[in-house]
């Protein structure tokens, strides 16, 4: 024993005087994130939130030497304190408190001043990566959905930068359209609005949009989003508008653009047509629905007298939720394959009839003779119950028998036909017969074209009946007009029943008011001409999540012609001229190209301030007086949907298709689709290779955010906080980014005060982990690294885990599954690092000797973890990563020999196959050993509660197992040549003894015991007693050797060697 002590002392002295320099430090890989927090100066406690047993036990581990040295260094009374200067305390200026509100802007300024993004992109020599930014509206402050979207994009871009891609991210803004126009109008009084000319309105709208862009840009940059902010794209710039007109022209010349009178979604509150993407369908809308009857006056000869016996009292019964469209009725449609019935209203229902939900019309309540009613046979029981009457079936027949029957219009007193409709006529609701007004419905319009029905739409831009509606002229169709029509029908004995009907109804997403279907002269893009090509392209794109493909495919396959014209001033004009007399449009390749060249030079304002003659090509100048320029502007979805042409194809560093589009799930019917359609129509290919969609942001209870509920989470408030409000602290951008990484964005996500507090706590633990690493590397340089082959097994195991974690995180980044990275980071830091490796490492780091081999080997592993962790969290937490990088106590040299001054210059950690080649038997053994350690901790805690020990260093652990292989391995570890691998270091106890057998005499002297189940029938017996020997004053380990050294009678043999080594080193330095 003495011989071993002597040889160890000589080895230690040699190590002190001439510590070997190891191999060059390879680029270490990142690990899963770290959330454990370590107590550096006041204690060696490991901050664990994962294991209750470990948490309580670890706080009573070997705190002594560090605590004593800390107190002594602070001038606090210590019995002797003569060894305080021999303890290697952690040292770093990297603070535990982030102070993000101040520090993050400083880091962003550091990046800007040093043009870090530009340098990284220029130095990267990999492939190009293009994430094309979907432009948000420049019409107000950013909300939490914007933050989710832009941070997701930034995480991807920053990861690609670390992977050596040349990343080009050009932020954009949608600057035209009604949202901005309304903002301008709302800021003006009535008189100012009246005096407003189109050019003045456009000037104010452009000014408002540019100011909003500036505000939003500042906010996005505060989120830590990197991009080409100085060259962002705006849809209001002349070059963008010109490219948009070029796309329009190409579609027009291919025959995909046409003008027609068709029913479109019309917003009376905005006085313009709307696209499907501009609608929302709030829950709870209540319509006034009616069951009404139209009196048949004749049947075709082909019916062979089928209905003769029921004339003149035969009527068709229809149901509608839009009574105001009855004046425009042109037909009643039936399904040719459905079975219909002539029914007789025999009597009022008996008392057993369920209570009615609506009001009966006069025709049913009066004592007059009731008409015969034609309804779908399958619906007779339902209707009889609903109306509270007895319906006797007199005759049944197929719907085809009703074709070309004629009825009298209930208001206009004109004859109208019964026609065959499509599959939209079912027996799910109504009567099985459909009131058809081609001017007020898409399906009605399609049926009308088939039969040549008139397209009536007696409604003006404001949603009021026109003179065509006769007595209803001037009434609002969604208000008094609707009521008046119902009243009229009732008075004319045509109303069976009126009842409220709750359903989803289209609202204008800007004004939040109901819309109507209304036939107007509009410009359309005929999707039918390229629908199949679009469907084929969809199947070639990668959609994340995968079900998104079905969503956009369904929408594309079923969508009608795209109405692309708007009756607004603030937008890109549709480049068309109309003949003054014939109203025929003039639009050809020559006129379009001429307008495009003018717009590219002067902007779209030119359309309003230049004369028709100036806007026409020279060959038309002689006829200029015969034409007038159109007043419609393009749908804003055409604006943004042309961005692939205006941005991707026009900038040298970009290309089309983009690698990725990423927006909210609502963009399947918005930007994703408009971009797809314009690109397919003109280029025959999709503008993107991959599309990612994210859900909406809800509050912590899963409710939609609204000011009235007080549950709105403002991203700026999250970052900066609210002054003098403790419940609204400023968390900084990284906590917000950490939240983004934590959610499965493919569905709706939640956020709120409690969630943010949790994120802040996790961020703090992660920062604590980085601080532990930095502070314990204060005296380490890459030249100090220990080669892999010489590392203790515990260190090799730690590197194996690290490399596995790095690989898993990389896979998650590649698959855009950031929430998995968040989970890995927490698990790795709390379990693998804080609860084990960091806890065990403190002994050799603090008291093992500054240049001792075991300390340097541990520092080698810590350096690998630090360099890997910082780089792998950098895409998610760039400010924290950069803050840590700027506090590195050593320079990181890249593979090309250059020094990475900033974290994003360092690139992603290179995979280390040697670390991954950790033997399978060792992996299995260390897994069991860590489980055994957990059970040992339980017994130690029981002993502490029983007052046998205070800290774990007061204990000696006994182990026994009949499993010969495990017993041998444990015995080997007790006598391991490398101190770091010895069992008592791993258990953080003073001694461990493996017993060859158990006898009652021995176990009686061991007061506490437990068991670890190694296999089904094999256990390891665990015993705990007081440690042998005396406590070492310096390391607080118990040892029989304490008192053996005259010069240092209070030290154990290890500490005696360390102190002696340090003294020899000091003498050598003086000499």
Image (cartoon, rainbow, N blue to C red):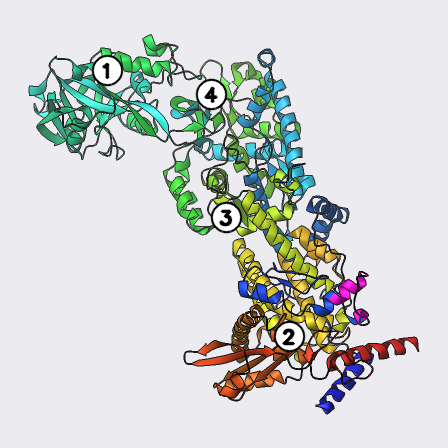
Report x, y in % for residue 860: 70, 71
Mark 3 closeness class: few <14, some 14–19, many ≥20 residues within 10 Å: many
Which one is earlier in the sequence, the residue at label 4 or at label 1?
4
Report x, y in % for residue 958: 56, 81
Judged from the image, the secondary structure of the residue bearing numbered disc 3 is loop
Q: Which residue lies furthest to the top in this view?
A: 471
Which one is earlier in the sequence, the residue at label 2 or at label 4?
4
Judged from the image, the secondary structure of the residue bearing numbered disc 1 is loop
| Label of residue 133 in the image | none
In the picture of the structure, the residue carrying the numbered disc 3 is 745
Judged from the image, the secondary structure of the residue bearing numbered disc 2 is helix
| Label of residue 954 in the image | 2
In the picture of the structure, the residue carrying the numbered disc 4 is 269
The answer to whether residue 643 is visible is yes
Relative side of 41 to 197, left or right: right
On the rendered image, what quadrant is the C terminus found in? bottom right
Relative side of 263 to 685, left or right: left
Which one is earlier in the sequence, the residue at label 4 or at label 3?
4
Range of residues picked out in magenta: 68-85
Which one is earlier in the sequence, the residue at label 2 or at label 3?
3
In the picture of the structure, the residue carrying the numbered disc 1 is 409
* In this view, the mark in front (2 or 1): 2
**Distance between the alpha carbons at the discs numbered 2 and 1:** 100 Å
The answer to whether residue 738 is visible is no
Q: In which quarter of the image is residue 802?
A: bottom right
Q: Is residue 82 magenta?
A: yes
Residue at the location (12% across, 17% down)?
A: 370
Mark 2 closeness class: few <14, some 14–19, many ≥20 residues within 10 Å: many
């Amino acid at each position: 024993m003495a011989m071993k002590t002597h040889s160890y002392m000589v080895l230690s002295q040699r190590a002190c005087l001439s510590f070997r320099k190891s191999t060059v430090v390879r680029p270490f890989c990142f690990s899963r994130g770290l959330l454990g927090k370590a107590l550096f100066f006041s204690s060696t406690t490991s901050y664990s939130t994962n294991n209750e047993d470990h948490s309580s036990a670890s706080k009573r581990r070997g705190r002594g030497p560090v605590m004593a040295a800390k107190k002594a260094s602070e001038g606090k009374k210590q019995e002797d304190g003569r060894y305080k200067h021999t303890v290697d305390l952690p040292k770093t200026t990297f603070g535990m408190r982030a102070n993000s509100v101040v520090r993050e802007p400083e880091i962003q300024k550091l990046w800007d001043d040093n043009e870090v993004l530009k340098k990284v992109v220029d130095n990267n020599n990999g492939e190009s990566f293009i994430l094309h930014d979907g432009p948000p509206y420049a019409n107000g402050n950013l909300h939490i959905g914007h933050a989710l979207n832009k941070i997701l994009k930034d995480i991807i871009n920053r990861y690609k930068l670390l992977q050596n891609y040349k990343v080009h991210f050009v932020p954009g803004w949608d600057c035209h359209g009604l949202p901005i126009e309304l903002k301008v109008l709302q800021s003006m009084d009535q008189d100012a609005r009246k005096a407003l000319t189109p050019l003045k309105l456009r000037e104010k709208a452009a000014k408002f949009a540019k100011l909003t862009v500036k505000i939003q840009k500042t906010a996005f940059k505060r989120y830590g989003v990197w991009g080409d902010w100085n060259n962002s794209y705006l849809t209001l710039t002349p070059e963008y508008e010109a490219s948009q007109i070029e796309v329009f022209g190409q579609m027009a010349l291919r025959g995909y653009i046409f003008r027609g009178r068709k029913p479109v979604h019309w917003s009376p509150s905005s006085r313009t047509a709307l696209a499907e993407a501009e609608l929302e369908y709030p829950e709870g809308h209540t319509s006034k629905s009616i069951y009404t009857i139209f009196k048949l006056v004749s049947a075709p000869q082909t019916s062979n007298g089928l209905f003769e016996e029921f004339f003149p009292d035969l009527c068709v019964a229809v149901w509608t939720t839009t009574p105001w469209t009855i004046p425009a009725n042109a037909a009643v449609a039936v399904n040719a394959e459905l079975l219909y019935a002539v029914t007789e209203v025999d009597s009022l229902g008996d008392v057993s009839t369920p209570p009615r939900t609506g009001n009966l019309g006069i025709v049913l309540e009066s004592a007059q003779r009731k008409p015969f009613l034609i309804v779908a046979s399958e619906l007779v029981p339902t209707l009889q119950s609903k109306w509270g009457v007895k319906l006797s079936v007199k005759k049944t027949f197929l719907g085809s028998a009703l074709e070309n029957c004629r009825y009298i219009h209930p208001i206009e007193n004109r004859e109208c036909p019964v026609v065959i409709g499509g599959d939209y006529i079912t027996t799910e609701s109504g009567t099985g017969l459909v009131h058809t007004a081609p001017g007020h419905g898409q399906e009605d319009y399609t049926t009308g074209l088939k039969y040549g029905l008139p397209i009536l739409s007696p409604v003006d831009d404001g949603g009021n009946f026109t003179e065509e509606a006769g007595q209803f002229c001037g009434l609002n169709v969604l208000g008094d007009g609707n009521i008046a029509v119902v009243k009229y029908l009732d008075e004319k004995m045509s109303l069976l029943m009126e009842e409220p009907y709750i359903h989803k109804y289209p609202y204008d997403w800007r004004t939040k008011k109901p819309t109507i279907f209304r036939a107007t002269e509009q410009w359309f893009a005929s999707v039918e001409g390229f629908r199949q090509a679009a469907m084929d392209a969809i199947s070639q794109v990668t959609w994340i999540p995968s079900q998104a493909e079905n969503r956009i495919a369904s929408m594309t396959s079923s969508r009608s012609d795209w109405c692309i014209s708007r009756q607004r001033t603030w937008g890109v004009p549709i480049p068309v001229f109309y003949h003054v007399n014939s109203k025929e449009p003039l639009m050809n390749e020559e006129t379009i190209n001429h307008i495009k060249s003018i717009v590219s030079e002067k902007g779209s304002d030119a359309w309003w301030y230049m004369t028709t003659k100036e806007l026409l090509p020279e060959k038309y100048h002689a006829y200029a007086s015969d034409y007038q320029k159109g007043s419609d502007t393009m749908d804003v979805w055409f604006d943004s949907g042309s961005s692939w042409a205006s941005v991707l194809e026009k900038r040298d560093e970009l290309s089309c298709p983009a690698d990725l589009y990423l927006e909210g799930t609502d963009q399947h019917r918005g930007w994703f689709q408009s971009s797809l359609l314009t690109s397919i129509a003109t280029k025959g290919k999709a503008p993107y290779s991959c599309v990612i969609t994210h859900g909406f942001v809800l509050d912590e209870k899963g409710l939609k955010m609204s000011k009235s509920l007080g549950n709105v989470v403002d991203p700026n408030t999250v970052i900066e906080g609210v002054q003098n409000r403790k419940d609204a602290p400023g968390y900084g951008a990284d906590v917000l980014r950490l939240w983004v990484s934590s959610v499965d964005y493919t569905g709706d996500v939640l956020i709120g005060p409690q969630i943010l507090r949790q994120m802040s706590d996790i961020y703090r633990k992660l920062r604590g982990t980085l601080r532990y690493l930095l502070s314990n590397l204060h005296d380490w340089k890459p030249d100090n690294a220990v080669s892999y082959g010489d590392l203790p097994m515990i260190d090799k195991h730690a590197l194996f885990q690290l490399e596995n974690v790095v690989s898993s995180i990389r896979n998650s980044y590649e698959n855009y599954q950031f929430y998995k990275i968040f989970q890995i980071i927490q698990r790795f830091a709390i379990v693998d690092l804080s609860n084990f490796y960091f806890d065990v490492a403190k002994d050799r780091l603090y008291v093992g000797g500054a240049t001792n081999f075991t300390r340097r080997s541990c520092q080698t592993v810590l350096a690998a973890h630090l360099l890997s962790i910082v780089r792998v969290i950098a895409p998610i937490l760039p400010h924290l990563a950069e803050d840590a990088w700027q506090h590195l106590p050593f320079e990181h040299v890249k593979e090309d020999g250059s020094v990475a001054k900033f974290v994003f210059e360092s690139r992603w950690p290179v995979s280390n196959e040697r670390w991954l080649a950790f033997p399978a038997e060792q992996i299995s053994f260390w897994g069991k050993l860590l489980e055994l350690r957990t059970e040992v901790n339980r017994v130690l805690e029981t002993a502490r509660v029983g007052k046998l020990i205070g800290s774990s260093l007061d204990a000696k652990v006994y182990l026994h197992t009949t499993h010969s292989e495990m017993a041998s391995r444990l015995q080997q570890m007790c006598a391991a040549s490398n101190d770091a691998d010895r069992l008592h270091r791993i258990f953080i106890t003073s001694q461990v003894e493996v017993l060859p057998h158990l006898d009652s005499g021995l176990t009686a002297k061991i007061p506490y015991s437990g068991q670890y189940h190694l296999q089904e029938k094999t256990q390891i017996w665990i015993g705990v007693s007081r440690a042998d020997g005396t406590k070492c004053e310096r390391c607080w380990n118990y040892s029989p050797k304490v008192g053996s050294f005259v010069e240092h009678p209070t030290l154990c043999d290890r500490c005696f060697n360390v102190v002696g080594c340090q003294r020899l080193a000091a003498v050598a330095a003086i000499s």
